[in-house]
Amino acid sequence: MKRSLHLLSIAFLLFLASCSKDEDPTPPVEEEPLTAEQQYFLKIALGSELGQSSAVIRKWSQDMKVFVPDSSNTELMTELKRVMGEINGLSQSIQVKRVMTMQEANYVIFLSDKDTYARHEPNAAAYVDNNWGLFWIYWTSGHTLTRGSMYVDVVRNTDINCMKHLLREELTQSLGLMIDTEDYAESIFYQRWTCTPSYAEIDKKLISYILNPKIQSGMGRAEVIQVLRTL
């Protein structure tokens, strides 16, 4: 008797559930899936590779004013001008500009040996031995980038194409695209050693996202996804 009542109760509940479903003709709204570029952006832009930083957007709210203490390497300086032009062409917000003095700058590029860079950026000293290219960036409590620096090792690294790659990679990551992955071998954000001489198309998309004013410092994953769906 107990078992029969139990089965009857289940049947009654199923009947109610099916009636309730039939009475609501409106299908659930499904969000469009993110594109490959948008998914890649979430991996690259939320957080940073070094330290224990939270997974939020960090970006500049002012122009990057770049100073190069030693500009004697004409080939790398030509490449720097090219990279800055490409970034600025993709930006809807800040610009990357070269300045002529350290006092004017909020970002310094060292084309040097590791020890020279470590003296300028003591916080990065523990990492220079194992990195031929490196950037170090600072931000406010609101996650707005305020200043930073980078270096390309022109002593241990003797391949000019690899130097150019490192220059492009470290400067681009300093925009707020701070994480490397192994997703796209042609990408400037590829984690393994490469000497990629230019941006992949997917890189250009990521740069345009981080430099879009709709993407704001401090945004978490859910907020970023909402904005990406509108871009």
Image (cartoon, helix red, strand yellow):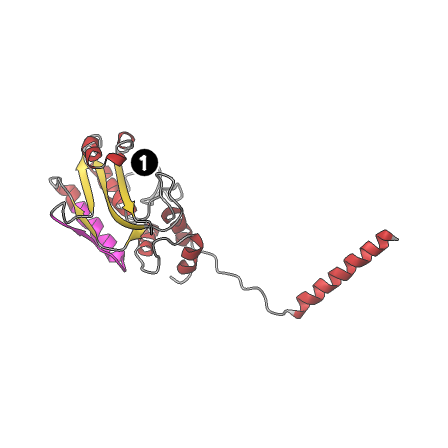
Q: Judge by depth and name the residue closer to the eye, 6 or 36.
A: 6
Instruction: Please state if 81 lies on the left or on the right of 221 as rendered.
Output: left
Q: In which quarter of the image is residue 209?
A: bottom left
Tell me if residue 153 comes above or below residue 215 in the rendering: above
Mark 1: amino acid = Trp
x then y, percent, for residue 230: 40, 63
Provide residue 177's location: percent of width, then percent of height. 33, 47
Residue closest to the eye, 226 or 169: 226
Count the marks: 1
Q: Is residue 82 magenta?
A: yes
Within 10 angstroms of label 1, few (less than 14), some, or many (20 or more) residues?
Answer: few
Residue at the spot 23% in from the left edge and 41% down from the top edge:
150
Q: Which residue is drawn at 32% across and 36% down?
A: 193
Residue displayed at 17% across by 49% down: 81
Nearest the eye: 184 or 10? 10
Check the image and name the residue furthest to the front.
141
Q: Name the residue under label 1.
A: 193
Residue 91 lies in the magenta-colored region: yes
